[in-house]
Image (cartoon, rainbow, N blue to C red):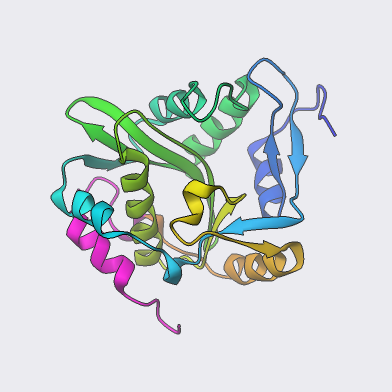
Amino acid sequence: MHSGIVQITPEIVLRAYAAGIFPMAESADDPGIYWVEPRERGIIPLDGFHVNKRLARTVRSDAFEVRIDTDFEGIIDGCAAPAQDREKTWINTRIRRIYGDLFDLGYCHTVEVWEGSTLVGGLYGVSLGAAFFGESMFHTARDASKVALVHLVARLKRGGYMLLDTQFVTDHLAQFGAREVSRREYKRLLGEALAYEARWDAWPTGETIPGAVALDMIATPREGK
């Protein structure tokens, strides 16, 4: 159902996430917003994240610089741009404004992959309690979005997160261990995650985390698991 002219505030969006619902738009040209609650929800189990040997070598080489929360506009521009695997985007003006507001409030975060002074990939999503809701990713250099995802998972594990929500499972995400869970199971996992407060900045956001450190964190089982 479209929201029409109703003002969608950051508070409304956060309540929706807490209820297992997220906003989308039909296209960049459609001014409307609708709410989505998939029957089958995509997640990546944080202790089941797969990194193949070739990608691990790339991450360990630190060929890219990974920055956190420094260029929201650049990331959302990249996610909204046409790409080989998508001709159009669902990111419209209202989506940009909503997530820009959430970024300013400290709920939306970016993982950015840089090659020199050029942003070549990354992702953004929303942090609430001990859950992280991945929204979109992009790359213009080979493996850049994969490197961003590796660093995201490492940061989530470092900060004590319990749930990484991918909304849907694509072939791209499946290679990392993404799987579908039922709406009922998702609500259970979400409830558990929202009962705790994770720390996005357990690694300071201005600190450069070497790829080898990120890979070691991914390989370390979470406490109590």
Q: Which residue is pictured at 40% across the width and 81% down the height? A: 223
Q: Within the magenta stretch, is there residue 217?
A: yes
Q: Quarter of the image containing the N terminus? A: top right
Q: Quadrant of the C terminus?
A: bottom left
Residue nearer the viewer, 16 or 188: 188
Residue at x-position 65% and y-position 47%: 14
Q: Nearer the viewer, residue 114 or 85?
A: 85
Q: Is residue 123 left or right of residue 53?
A: right
The residue furthest right is: 1
Q: Is residue 51 left or right of residue 3?
A: left
Q: Is residue 8 left or right of residue 102?
A: right
At a point 39% along the width and 58% down the height, the residue shown is 153
Q: Is residue 161 above or below residue 136?
A: below
Q: Position of residue 3 (x, y in %)?
A: 81, 29
Above or below for 95 versus 126? above
- Find the residue positioned furthest to the bottom: 224
Residue 19 can be seen in this image: no
Residue 195 in percent (x, y) is at 60, 70
Name the quadrant containing residue 194: bottom right
Name which quarter of the figure residue 71 lies in: top left
Between 130 and 51, the one lying in front of the other is 51
Q: Magenta residues?
A: 201-225
* Residue 61 x/y as whole percent: 14, 49
Q: Is residue 209 magenta?
A: yes
Percent x, y of residue 118: 24, 25
Q: How many labels sit on residues?
A: 0
Q: Can the viewer see residue 110?
A: yes
Quadrant of the rendered image containing residue 67? top left
